[in-house]
Amino acid sequence: MICYDTVFSGVADILTKKGAEILFSPSRIVKEGIEPWKMYVQVRSLENRITIIAPNVEDVKLGGSSLIVELTKEEKIVKTRITEIKGECEESANITFSNYETIRKQRIEDRNNFQ
């Protein structure tokens, strides 16, 4: 997904249904739009039970905040864990894709039964 694509739920949905195991969403979000953008990225991750890495360009006009959104499961509730990255960094994430496989399949199945 690229920048504005994150606003539309269908983009992440299609990529997930096609078998994506992780989504990358590079953006150029201005400071004023950072909070809504964070919510969109988090919601797309929850909707599709998928990790999203969302780098945002850093400069004076832009927010520069990048995100790694991963999922955690507490009892039966799936939640997000957000790592926010500001400035240049060498942040890394240890993502185990098999942790998401079951919850993603269940989400896609539930969504297909709803339609």
Image: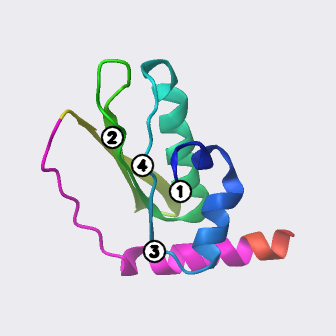
Give residue 24's mark.
none
* Residue picked out by circle 1: 1
- Whichever of labels 4 and 3 marks the residue nearer the N terminus, that label is 3
* Residue picked out by circle 2: 66
Q: CA distance from mark 3 to mark 2?
A: 19 Å
* Residue picked out by circle 4: 26
Identify the element where label 4 is drawn. Answer: loop
| Magenta span | 88-110
Relative placement, left or right, of 38 versus 69 is right
Relative placement, left or right, of 112 versus 91 is right
Q: Nearer the viewer, mark 4 or mark 3?
A: 4
Q: CA distance from mark 4 to mark 3?
A: 17 Å
Q: CA distance from mark 1 to mark 2?
A: 14 Å
Q: Does the stretch in magenta take in 99? A: yes
* Residue picked out by circle 3: 21
Q: Residues within 10 Å of mark 4 (few under 14, many from 20)?
A: some
Q: Nearer the viewer, mark 4 or mark 2?
A: 4
Say what amino acid the circle numbered 1 marks.
Answer: Met
- Whichever of labels 1 and 2 marks the residue nearer the N terminus, that label is 1
